[in-house]
Image: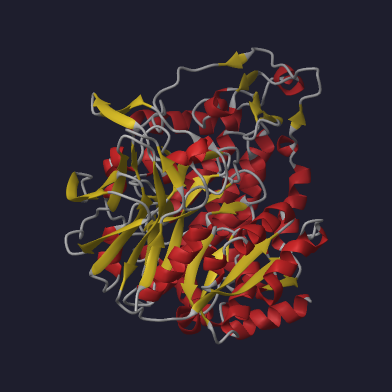
Amino acid sequence: MTYTLQNAVLPLDRDPDLLPLYVDPETWSTIDEEPVRVTSVAQLSNILDRHRARIVAGRRVSFGTYFNAFPASYWQHWTAVRRVRLTVRTSGDLTILVYRSNGAGTKQRIETREVRGESSETSFDLALDQYSDGGWIWFDVAADRSDAMFEGAAWTTEDEPVRPGKASIGITTYNKPDYCVNTLQALADSPDVLDVVDRVFLIDQGTDLVADQATYPEVASRLGETLEVIRQPNLGGSGGFARAMTETLQRPESDFVQLLDDDVRIEPESIRRSVVFGRYASVPTIVGAHMFDLLDRPKLHAWAEVVDDAPFMWRALYQERLPHDFSVANLRQSPMLHMRLDADYNGWWMCLIPTSILREIGLSLPAFIKWDDAEFCLRARDAGYPTVSMPGVALWHVSWVGKDDSIDWQAYFHARNRIVAALLHSRSPQGGTLIRHSRRLDLKHLMMMQYYPVELRHRALRDVLSGPAHMRRTLSTAMPEARAIARKHPETIVHKDSGVPLRSRRGRQVFRRLKQHQFDSPSGLSLRIFTLRTLLSHWFHTPRPENVAQPEVEFGKADAHWWRVPAFDSALVSAADGSGQNIYTRDRAQYRRMLRESLRLHRRLQREWPRLSDQYRRALPDLVSEARWRATFEEQS
């Protein structure tokens, strides 16, 4: 029997920004070791449907792209599949060229076939035995003197999957109904994807309901009993995904739950690929998706995420090279993209979890938002189950380019859940450098005159110190309480553009921009001197009255760094999303009180770390148990 591992697909939308992710009809060269597009012949009119394209006479089109190359390294490393067959369907006179790469991105030709005539089917048998460090396999199609047709392609194997079950999809939403309806429509339009789907659980935790949308009845009718909408109070992402997990565990045909965020656009083939890869993985494996920017669709924003143990902080591997813009350098021109990258966790914007792992290690931590995905994958890792951040499996999600959730109500969850995850999983004594890093974050916020996130962070520390019981007890109340605290802090008000511009006394401060990820921040001895001077200045000096009455200076968001803003009594700073401006004003009394409290709380956390770690680890099985989550859902209903 033949099993399809991956289908060649073309974009669902007639969007020229998407073409580089699917096909590459460009001619490229290299100048100073950088990829340069020599000619561009991309035309949307040559994309005929989801699987068919016209190859213009004399032109060559490469399928060595993000969504259509085959990630051979990942299949070799994580599965027992050692032979695959590429079958390309065409019509017309053309040449098919098959290539491979290694972990360094070096290209090698495997085979070439000339094809003549109508409705041809050309197959290539390929071994997966030379890709331990990385590498893809792909094919190009070159038309002869007349136009030719690409009719589709598939990567298949005769090996049977390790586990044959389907997946239930769990979508958690809070007032993003239009996105959700679009996701449901994309699923309904993809019968090959629905073949691997058991149920679609849509957990609606909002007030603007998906079921009230005008287009919902039609798509619900098409999906039929496959779709099940469940309403519950807002328990955050962790509560919504835990509900999807519990419902999936009751489905005998579901071997996986596929978690999906709400504000996304999906590539349906990615869902099918993730399920198929999960079926073939040698051991039960969490299969994560990469994330592209929904508002700048050729840009890859997240892949292969890890948690550095010493500071216990998340990041992407090679984060300094992200985002990667496929409109500037496609897969074949980007050696970095050919390495096999091993992840610690994957964001729950799209993540496939085997139900066998859920039954063994439990469900989501009752964290509301932030760190629930990382904590779960670390818990799975400790139990022997890997997370694979799978190339060619991705969706588009609203990126964090226009956000700064470290200074809004989410600051509470950033702080609390990071510390809780470290108490549960850190392998470093006393949590490594986490406490020192956390204390420095407080200092930076205080120097920046951002008193609201500091109050939330201190609230988070006090809750952590109170013990693990607070997490479930405050699951539905922590967020509204955190938001209510903002009313005490005038710097949280975003002053919208009203036609009369806000102005500062000394005008806008503009700085020379360095390269991406390079800053002119102080370091070494100069950093110590700067910090000491700034802390003492804010402790002893009150702001001048005229700088309280009117902001002293103005900063664009990109210039408002912690080593610049503290030099002034007050500052007008653009909001991250560009919707207005915040006014930061020095408050000596608040600064003194919060600085003392920060030092006290962090000293106590350091002193009690061993006891707290033991306490949280003993409480974990109950915190994440299916029974306790079911009890929570019943209490909240």
- Residue 423 point in image, percent of width and height: 46, 67
Count numbered badges in the picture.
0
Q: Is residue 130 left or right of residue 395?
A: left
- Residue 444 point in image, percent of width and height: 52, 38
Indicate the quadrant where residue 494 lies: top right
Q: In this view, does 305 lie to the left or right of 77?
A: right
- The quadrant the C terminus occupies is bottom right
| Residue 179 or residue 24, whichever sits in front | 24
Indicate the quadrant where residue 503 lies: top right
Color encoding of the figure: secondary structure
Residue situated furthest top in the rendering: 506
Examine the rendered structure and indicate whether residue 331 appears above or below residue 495: below
Examine the rendered structure and indicate whether residue 370 appears above or below residue 112: below
- The quadrant the N terminus occupies is bottom left
Let me know if residue 404 appears in the view. Answer: yes
At horizontal 26% and vertical 59% (from top left) the residue drawn is 73
Let me know if residue 298 appears in the view. Answer: no
Indicate the quadrant where residue 625 lies: bottom right
At horizontal 39% and vertical 62% (from top left) the residue drawn is 6
- Residue 194 point in image, percent of width and height: 56, 70
| Residue 152 or residue 433, whichever sits in front | 152
- Residue 380 point in image, percent of width and height: 42, 73
At horizontal 29% and vertical 51% (from top left) the residue drawn is 138
Examine the rendered structure and indicate whether residue 118 appears above or below residue 620: above
| Residue 320 or residue 568, whichever sits in front | 320
At horizontal 70% and vertical 31% (from top left) the residue drawn is 579
